Image (spheres, helix red, strand yellow):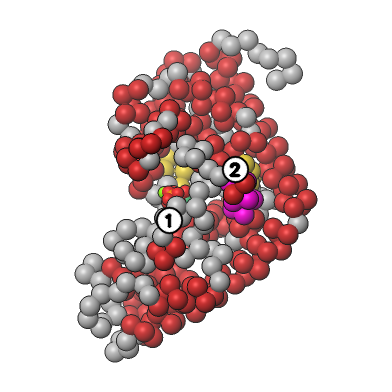
Amino acid sequence: MKHTILSGITPSGRLTLGNYLGAIRTWVPLQRDSECYFPLVDLHAITVRQDPEAFSDRCLDFIALYLACGVDPNKSAVFVQSHVPEHGELAWILNCYTQMGELNRMIQFKEKGAKHRENVNAGLFCYPVLMAADILLYQVTHVPIGADQKQHLELTRDIAHRFNGLYGTVFQIPEPLIPQAGARVMNLQDPSKKMDKSDPNDANIIGLLDEPDAVLRKIKRAVTDSGSEIKHEAMKPGISNLLEIASATLDVPISDLEERYRGKGYGVLKDDVADAVIETLEPIQRGFRQIRADRTELDRIIANGAERARSIANDTLNLVTESIGLIRRAGR
Ligand code: ATP
Ligand code: MG
């Protein structure tokens, strides 16, 4: 059976090298033999306050970057979550099949709630239910997820099982797709933490749209470890991160790189990593500028993606409403 895959990114902050190497780049080969859905999940982003103008610009930037990174809108459904109203509709229904206690246990809610104490809203609390709706609407078989989303996918599966138990098989039960060694990029100034696109400190991250001199400067200033040996090991998180980045961008195994840099200093490694990153970003940035400059074409692509997504989402929602006994709306 052909796999159906969904992977969403929240439009907050700015896309980083981590998002590219750990997520977007891994989507490109998946498009060959799977049915792929790549929603930009803007409704998730408004669980924290957004500046309206910057928010819409950022959403367009993210979609243009997806395309520049090799996501093909002819093969995959690339769309904006809020353009497919079925996400919100199904989320409401699923809210009624989710217990407060289950949501109370979500670690991310506790973490995000602690970070934004002034705005712990109901949307933030129900975020995992909207994520369940995102997935279940498309009868997704596999969801590529990092460790931070594991608990949310478990909840999605529980909700789907519960619903199916009540009404018969309505939803496909999604499985996690553990990424095949998709690189995990760490924070440049604190390599014990991962690089986050919503990090307010620009020195910690490499943005996909960073200019070459900014990339060089940030990598030069990246925190490294005392000592001088270039080795990938737990005691050397900074050097290990640089080796990971080099390995992913140059497509060379880490052991080969350790060999290559034997007896050389950290400065040489940093220069080479900066070069490799700059070279990786150059075609992406070129593509981005071209795509972002043609708003009409970008709008057309986004509209097509929504139409494609809606045709499936609408079928699932009809199945759901019929199961519950909501009267079918004319024309649906
Ligand atoms: P945020 O701070 O907004 O959570 P984020 O960078 O963690 O930012 P997400 O929207 O949570 O972004 O994740 C988007 C995708 O990018 C996910 O598939 C996630 O696994 C991947 N990803 C995020 N950060 C990294 C990283 N540092 N290295 C590798 N993959 C990453
Ligand atoms: Mg995250």
Residue farthest toward the bottom in the current orientation of the protein: 263
State the image coordinates of residue 294 (x, y, percent, origin top left): 76, 57
What is the secondary structure assignment of the residue under circle 2? helix
Question: Which x, y percent locates residue 181?
Answer: 40, 60
Note whether ligand 1 is within 8 Å of mark 2: no
Residue 108 in the figure: left or right of residue 330: left
* Label ID, residue 8: none
Vertical relation: 150 (above or below) 155: below
Q: Amino acid at mark 1?
A: Pro
Q: Is residue 319 above or below residue 265?
A: above
User: Quick check: can you spot residue 246?
Assistant: no
As drawn, is 53 to the left or to the right of 44?
right
Apparent side of residue 57 relative to residue 245 in the rendered image (left or right)? right
Residue 215 visible in the displayed image? yes
- Mark 1 CB in 8 Å range of ligand 1? no
Q: Please, is residue 16 above or below residue 141 in the view?
A: below
Whichever of labels 2 and 1 marks the residue nearer the N terminus, that label is 2
Task: From the image, tell me which residue sits under label 1.
Answer: 200
Residue 61 forms part of the magenta stretch: yes
Give residue 234's position: percent from left, percent from top: 23, 67
Query: Which disc, if any, is residue 52?
Result: 2
- Residue 62 falls inside the magenta stretch: yes
Q: Main secondary structure of the magenta part?
A: helix
Question: Can you say which quadrant of the picture contains the N terminus?
Answer: top right
Q: Dot 1, crowdedness within 10 Å: few (<14), some or many (≥20)? A: few
Task: Determine the residue positioned at 60% across, 28% down.
Answer: 86
- In the image, the segment drawn in magenta is 55-63
